Image (spheres, rainbow, N blue to C red):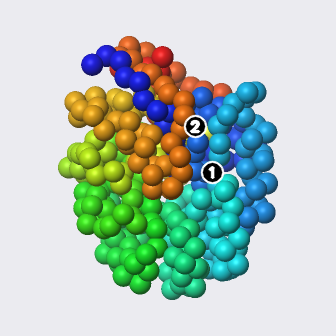
Amino acid sequence: MNKLTIIKPDDWHLHLRDSPYLAAVVGDTAKQFGRAIVMPNLKPPITNCEEAESYRQRILSDLPVGSQFQPLMTLYLTNNTRVEDIALASLSHNILGAKLYPAGATTNSDAGVTHIQKIYPVLEAMQKHQFPLLIHGEATDNKVDIFDREKHFIDSTMQQIRNDFPELRIIFEHITTREAVDFVLAQDDDVAATITPHHLLINRNAMFEGGIRPHHYCLPIAKREEHRVALLNAATGHSGRFFAGTDSAPHSQTAKESACGCAGIYSAFCAIELYAEAFELAGDFSHFEAFMSLNGPKFYRLPVNTLQITIEKSEWQVPQTLDYPGGLLIPFKAGETLQWSIV
Ligand code: DOR
Ligand code: ZN
């Protein structure tokens, strides 16, 4: 198969940052996707409807002229999130869920939740209003090995949230392990997961290939090959509860190539081509459209996009660098050849 037409995809997990970085990256996503769920981990974070709406307006005003791209907003949960903010957000067509960052788990998560019990009234309200909970699922105790933090979170917290709020709608974000795949498969239709292109394409060796490779460092960190294979099987399989979420997370070249480099991989420049690369590895495109364009809207109870896109097998080279305010941005797979392009 050399050519494939599918319904235009959406990105169900994206970091766009704020001005001036926003304008440098939003066009890459808008060019490829109909909609994207925008992460709220700005500094300070987006914690209520008013902030989400004004961030949405900033995104819209930085879009390329004529773009129909729709940003879908999320709230950042803190220990102090109010039940009233959830009730209000659940009435908005532009705010689709709230994100749980365990405090200290990742970039700009300091204001996150310190103990899950602190937000039990909020989770109760989210369950009642059927307002989705997006979870960064990693344990934050730094005594837990970094490669075990997702599994640890499933056993310590995810299972507990499921038991205590059985009807809460949950998206387990950017899963990276076989255990997370198995967890999602064992749940009912209230639980889904996003999978990034990089976790489908690299394992943890990619961070240390001939030296330290900061552009392959993200959180959750890439795991062993057996986990990448489990993710690829989930993405290309028929479950219907796994979908594309790039977790594209821009940091300048200097912020990445540093003694303490930031976590995040910039995949928005060629996200669809990267997912196609992964499905090509699996040798099975039969669920490509479902994963890219159908499963996400189904879970979020939105219509699918009306436009279509076509990809074809035709080699091209990812640029070494992209422009970014105050420096450069290094895209995932910089300088490498990809097999699929968007027509
Ligand atoms: O690698 C990551 N980068 N993981 C996250 O959870 C956050 C993101 C960011 O905002 O840079
Ligand atoms: Zn993210």
Kindly state the secondary structure of the residue where label 2 is placed. Answer: loop
Give the amino acid at mark 2.
Gly
Residue 217: x and y, percent?
Answer: 44, 46
Give the amino acid at mark 1.
Leu
Residue 303: x and y, percent?
Answer: 53, 46
Q: Is residue 140 left or right of residue 90?
A: left
As drawn, the label of residue 72 is 1
Please identify the quarter of the rendering in which residue 146 is found: bottom left
**Residue 209 appears in the figure:** no
Residue 117: x and y, percent?
Answer: 51, 86
Mark 1 CB in 8 Å range of ligand 2? no
As drawn, 223 above or below 161? above
- The residue positioned 53% from the left and 70% from the top of the image is 130
Distance CA(mark 2)–CA(mark 1): 11 Å
Q: Depth check: give the residue in front, 321 or 183.
A: 183
Q: Is residue 31 left or right of residue 117?
A: right
Q: Earlier in the sequence, mark 2 or mark 1?
A: 2
Q: Depth check: give the residue in front, 183 or 301.
A: 301
Residue position marked by numbered label 2 in the rendering: 34
As drawn, 202 above or below 96? above
- The residue positioned 70% from the left and 78% from the top of the image is 84
Q: Is residue 189 left or right of residue 281?
A: right
